[in-house]
Amino acid sequence: MTIRPPSTALALIGLLALTACSAGSLGSSDSGGDGKVSISYLIGNQDQDVKTAEQLVKDFSAKNPDITIKTETRPAGTEGDNIVKTRLSTGDMPDVFNYNTGSLFQAIAPQKNLVPLSDQGYIGDLDENFKKTVTADGQVYGVPVGGFMGGAVLYNIPIYTRLGLKPPATWAEFMANSAKIKAAGIPPVIQTYGETWTSQLFVLGDFHNVAAVEPDFADKYTKNQAKYATSPAALKGFEHTEAVHDAGYENKDFASAKLPDGLRMLAQGKGAQYPILSGVVANMVATYPDAAKNVGLFALPGDDASKNGLTVWTPGANYIPKTTTGAKLDAAKKFLAFIASPDGCKSQTAAGAPTGPYAVKGCDLPADVPQAIKDMQPYLDKQGASSLALEFVSPVKGPSLEQITVEVGSGIRKAKDGAARYDEDVKKQAQQLGLAGW
Amino acid sequence: MTLTSIRTRAETPAATRASAAKVYTPYSGWFYLPSAIIYGVLFIVPTFASLYFSLTRWSLFESKFIGLENFKLFFSEPQLVKGFTNTLIFAVVTSGSKVVLGLLLAVLLTSQIVARGYLRSVVFFPVLVSTIGVGITFTVLMNPDHGLINGGLSALGIDGPGWLTDPKYALLSVAAVDIWKGVGLATLIYIAGIVSIPREYLEAARVDGASSWETFRRIVLPLSRPATVTVIILSLIGGLRSFELIWAMTRGGPGFTSDVIASVIYKQYQAGFYGLSTAGNVVLFIAVTAIVLPLSYFLNRKEVDL
C-alpha cells in the first residue's frame, strides 16, 4: 500500500522522461566506428530551398561517400523562427541548420547556441558584408547559402520598350513612367497584399536612398535616436507606398492577389512594375521561361538620381548548433566548407537560377543568368551604389511592418501615421534584445 | 487498523460525517493520484509557469524578470485596443445571431415539416467540419475577383464588395462564416430545450385558443430559457477566444482591421515576444472570466424551473 503511489508516480515520470528524450536522440545511433557518419540538416520548406539543399547534399556526398546527410524541413517565416528557437533551446537541433542572417540571427543567441567558425580556413573567402551579418562578439557563425538579393523593382521590358520608357533613377521619373503606363491601359505597379510580406519593399528597399542622405541613420536607429516618422528620408518609403495607392497605380486585385499572381502579371505583361526581392526571380523563370529575358530590374528610385542605388539582402546561412559534437561535428564542418567553396556555388547554380552574386570569393555567375539578375551587377560594381538592408546593419526590426505597409498601401492609414506606428512596433524588439537606450 | 478507525470515527461526529462518504467510495484515494499528476503536470504547473513568465522578458533561451512591464506594453499597444473592440463586436454579433437563428431554426425543425431529419442534419453538418477547412474554403469563395460569391452576385447585376479585403467588411464576413458554422450547435441545444417542454402546456394553450405566435411567445420562449442561457454563454466564450477562423481567413488583416485579442497574442508569439504574448494570454483569461462569470450568474439567477 505504501509502495504503490511512488511507483505509479515514478512510472509516470519515467514515461514522461522517455517521451521527452526520444525526440532528441533521433538519428544519434548511426555514428558507428566504421568511419561512416550520418548527419541531419534542417532547411526551410520553400521549393527553391529544398532543391538547393538536395543538390548540395548530392554533390557533397558524391565527394564524401562516408558522410550521409538527411534533410529535414521546417515552415518558413515566423512559424519557422519559433521552431528554430524551440529546437535550439531544448537541445534538439539537427546537426546543421539553415536560417536567416542579420537581425533574426542575433535573436537566436548565437554565442550561447552555435559553434563558432572563425578558425575555419575558408572564412577569408567569405564576402565582408556577409560576414558582418553572421558575426556576434567577433566570432563568425555561418556560411552563406544562395546569393545576394536586391530589394528592387522588377519591370516588364517589352512594355517599357513599347512605350519608349527608360528605367527611372528618381521617384518623379518613376511616377511619370507609371502615368504613361496607366494611360496605355496597363496597371503600372503590381502589389500583392494577399501575401503580406510583399508589401514592404517601398520601405525596406528604399534604405539605400535613406543611407545616402543620412549615413548614420542605422546607427542612430539602433540607439533609439532616429525614427522613421521623424526622419524625412526614412519617411519617404511610407509616402511612396501611399502615393502609389492614391494615384490609382495598383492592379485592381491588389488586396487579394498573392506572389504567384504578381509574378504572372509581370511575366505576361499584365502589369508593368513589381517592387519585390530578386529572390523570386528563380521561381518566376522556372514557371515562365520567357521572363528570363523579358523582366529587368532597377533599384527603388529616390529623390536624387546621383545617389540612387540598390538595397541588398545578404543570403541566408548554414549554422552548426553546440549540440553537434565528435564525428558529427567534423562531418558538419566539412559540409560547410564545401558550401563555402566554388564547388558549392556550382552545385547551387545547378539547382536553380541564382538570385544574385554569391557571397564566396571565386564564385562566378554563369553567363546565362536572367536579365533581372544581370541588371543588379552595375550597382554592385560601382563604389557606393549599393547598401545592405537595414535589417542587416541594425538588429532592430519590428514584426508588424508588413501589416502596416498593407494598411498604408490600401489607403486605410496615412504614411506619417504608419511610420509612427512602426516606430512603436520596433520598440518591443529592441527591448527584447536588451539594447541600450530603449 | 479497522478497529481503531471505527473508534476514532465514533468519537467525533464531524469526522464521522466526513469519513462516511469515504466508506461508500469503492476506490481507494490513491486512485486519484494518476489523474492528479496528469492534471498537475499538464495544467497546474503550466498555469503558474505562465503567470510567472508573463512577468518576464523571455527569449526561450533566457528570461529576465521585469515586473508588470509586459502588461503595461500590452495595454499601450494600439493594436490591442483595436483587437479588444473587435473581439467584443465579434463575440456579440456571433452569439446574438446564433441565439436568434438557432431559436428560429429549432422551432422550424421541431414542427411537423417534410424531411425534418434531413434538414436537421443539414443544419448540423457545418459543426462537424474542421474550422481551418471552412476558413480556407470561404476565403476562396469570398475572393473579390475570382470568388463564387461575387461571381453569383455579378450574375444578378450586383457588384459585390471585397468581403475579406475591404476593412469595413472583413470582420463581419468572418463573423458570418462563424455563425454559419456554429448555428447548428445552437439549434441542437434549442431543439433539446423545446422538446423537453411538457406537451400538456402546449395542449392547454391550444385548448385556450392561443395562436401559434402566442404559444411561441408565452410558452416556448420562456421555457427554453435554460437553452438560451447555454447558447449565449457557450457562443460568447467561443466568440471571445475565437482565433482559428480569423487566422485562416484574414490573419487579422487587411492591416490590423480584423485583429482580435487571440490573433494579437499569436502575433506577439510569432514575433518572438514570448513573455509579452504570455501576458496577453493572462489578460485574455481575465477578460473572459470577467465577462462570462457575472453574465452567467445574472442569466442563471432568473432561470425558471420547468
Image: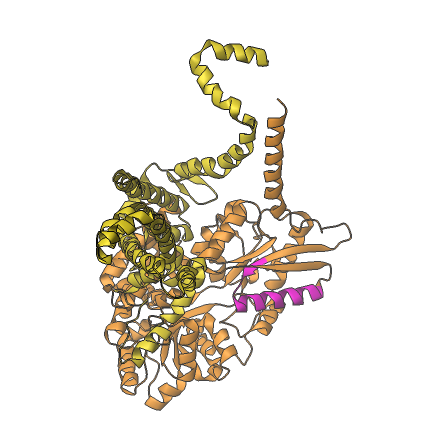
Chain colours: A orange, B yellow
Is B174 situated above or below B81? below
> Looking at the rendering, which quadrant does residue A98 occupy?
bottom right
The question of residue B259 being in magenta is answered with: no
The boundaries of the magenta stretch are A42-63
Is A352 situated above or below B15? below
Foreground residue, B102 or B265? B102
**Residue B201, position in %: x, y?**
28, 48
The question of residue A55 being in magenta is answered with: yes
Q: Can the viewer see residue A419?
A: yes
> Looking at the rendering, which quadrant does residue A238 occupy?
bottom left
**Residue at image location 69% in from the left, 55% down from the top:** A38
Main secondary structure found in the magenta portion = helix
Q: Can the viewer see residue A382?
A: no
Foreground residue, A159 or A142? A159
Is residue B212 shown left or right of residue A123? left
Screen quadrant of the N terminus of chain A: top right
Is residue A123 shown left or right of residue B15? right
Of all residues, the one furthest to the front in this rendering is: B207
Of all residues, the one furthest to the right in this rendering is: A34
**Residue A19, position in %: x, y?**
60, 43
Foreground residue, A196 or B38? B38
**Residue at image location 42% in from the left, 65% down from the top:** B136
**Residue at image location 42% in from the left, 39% down from the top:** B50
